[in-house]
Structures are given as structure tokens and as C-alpha cells.
Image: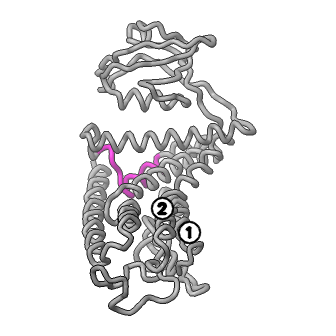
Amino acid sequence: MTLVFFILVFGLIVLFHEFGHYLLGRMNGIHVVEFAIGMGPKIVGFRKNDTDYVIRLLPIGGACMFEGEDGLERTEGNEVPVGDRPGEGAFNEAKVWGRFATVLAGPLFNFVLAFFLGLFLVGMGGSDRPVINGLMEGYPAQEAGIQPGDVIRRMNGERIYLAREILLNTYVNGGAPMTIEYEREGEIYTTVITPRYYPEEDRYLIGFQGYGEYVECRNLEVFRYGYYEIRYNLKATLKSLVMLLQGKAGMDDLSGPVGIAQMIGDVAKESAPHGPKVLFLNISNIALLLSVNLGVINLLPLPALDGGRLIFLLLEAVRGKPIPPDKEGMVHFAGFVALMAFMVFVLYHDIMRLMV
């Protein structure tokens, strides 16, 4: 069942990502040679309108391959191809902003999927307001005058809409002083709290002992809280990346396909006794987080990723001519090799973690 849920979740996320490339490519007159879900050997497929639609063995990626996407062979400063010109509908024959939109559409469609998943989650399971339920005796929040029933509005200037954001902001903040704005009976109060180290959990706490008030989302509330869901997951992804770059998070906080499959399996196992609704909601919540993650990671300005390709297209728009394809190809190839090496390293770490 872990494998089944992993294939379903990853397949859905990759399908939306590649469909974004496919749809915008077709809209800009670019011929799609192959639309593939998965990597490795072909399992099944069919051909329609000169495009191959394929499902491949490994459910950890996908591809939307365009005509002539590897570039035309040009001489420096000469817009006439030296080799054979690709057929009609070649990727590099489309206008630069059409190609830019085609590349950008993949990550954007991941955010679209995440928003739909957010609507489903809040429509079926409601949401959580950032209301304080209790306080730890002798901890900074109680000493600062915060009381049960108070609604947290801002933490360090960031607007708080969901109870889960309290944990996220507290964890990222560490032991630094934190400015908290809260509401009580319509009045707004502001206080500065310095978190206290809690050795039992090896982290800093401000002293909230339970928070969150259930909100049943109906009518237009579904769209508002659906937006809050994708906003929260986007914040969590960006803050996690910053912590990785700052060295505040390590390999134990990073997972590849094996680690993600394990996480999906654990969630499915814990959710199953509570019925199919809880199971489906929790799996959808993971899919939302992973879809946002894939969208963000692909937008990073790194070679071989969509973000790296967007940088080259922006340079082409500014220069008025493309970067020589051989040079761009070398950059993306080097990035691809580095990315594959990193994936192998993460995969090895995931397997070692399973064996401990």
C-alpha cells in the first residue's frame, strides 16, 4: 500500500507539472514529441497527433519533450543555423516569451494543484484558527500576560492565519526574542517574548500548551482557507530551504523518494484505523506539501532545473539573441550531473536511515 500511495501521489504531482509545460507549449505552437510520466523503461503508451504519451517504470519524475528542445547549432552572432533546421513547431523557433511561459508553467501548475488540494482539505476537514488553548507554567508566554483564548495575529511581523504557523515560526525563530501581536476581546496587544530552552525536546519554547480552534469552512470561506493552506506550505518550504543554507538543518531533515515513500506509508498506516476520510485527507495534505515543494525547487535558478532555463531565456530577452546552444547545453549538463549525484547521495542516506 505504501508503494501504491507513493505512485498515486507522485504521479499526480508530476502529471500536473508536465501538463503545465505541455499545455503552454501547445498554446505557443511548440510540437510535443513525448509526454511521459515516470522515468526509465517504457511500460505502456500510445501515439496521437504525432506525440507519444508514455508511462515509464520509475514513478519519480516525468518529461515533456519538445521538438528541437536541445537547441539549434548556431555560430556566434549568426542567427542562421549551421546544421539542419528542426521541423515546424521547434522549441527554439518559438518566441522567447512563449518559451518562457512554457517553462514557467510546470512549477506554476504545481501551485495550481496545491490550491485545489487546499480547497478539498478545508472543504472536507475544516481548518484551524491560531487560538491559544493553554499555557506552560512559568514559561515566557504566561509571564508576558498572554491568556488562553487569545488569538495570535502576528509573530515577528508575519501575519498568522493558521495555528500550525505558530509552531513553524517558533521553531525557525530558535532562542531569539520574538515580537508577538495577539487579540483579546477585540483589543490588540503586543509583547516581546524570549523563548526558553526546553531540554526534554531539545528546542526553544515560548510556553504555549496547545493551540488551535476548529473552523468549519463553508461557501467562500473555503477559498480563503484554501489560500491559507498553500500559503502555509509555501512558507514552510521557503523557511526550510533557508535553514538548510544557513546550516540550521541537516541531512536528517532532508528526504528523497525513499524517505518520502516511508513518510507516506507511515501516514497511511496511522490514518487507516480512523477510516477512509481521514486517510484520504492526510494523503492529500502530503500531496499538497510535495506539490508546493516541487514547484519551489524547480524555480530555483540552478542548471538543469526550470529556474535555470528561465535565467537563460531572460538573458536571451535582454541580449536580443540566444546564448549559444553548446554553451547553454554544457551548463545544463553539468547541473544535471550534479543533481543526479546529489539524488544518489540523498537516496543512500534515506536507505541508511531505514536500516538504523
Identity of the residue drawn at 58% across and 42% down: 273
Residue type pointed to by label 1: Leu
Near-viewer residue (302 or 318): 318
Please name the predominant secondary structure of the magenta segment in the image: helix
Q: Is residue 245 left or right of residue 278?
A: left
Residue type pointed to by label 2: Leu
Q: State the extent of the magenta-drawn residues as a range.
A: 252-266
Residue 215 shown in magenta:
no
Snapshot quadrant of residue 302: bottom left
Q: Is residue 16 above or below residue 180?
A: below
Q: Residues within 10 Å of mark 1 (few under 14, many from 20)?
A: many
Identity of the residue drawn at 27% across and 37% down: 248
Near-viewer residue (94 or 91): 94
Task: Work out whether residue 6 can be spotted.
Answer: no
Dot 1 lies on which element?
helix
Comes first in the chain, label 1 or label 2 = 1
Q: Is residue 329 left or right of residue 185?
A: left
> What mark, if any, has residue 24 been given in the picture?
1
Snapshot quadrant of residue 47: bottom right
Task: Work out whether residue 348 can be spotted.
Answer: yes
Please give the residue where the numbered disc 2 appears in the rendered image.
104
Q: Is residue 222 above or below residue 9?
A: above
Near-viewer residue (174 or 11): 174
Residue 255 shown in magenta:
yes
Residue 69, x across and y down, in percent? 42, 78
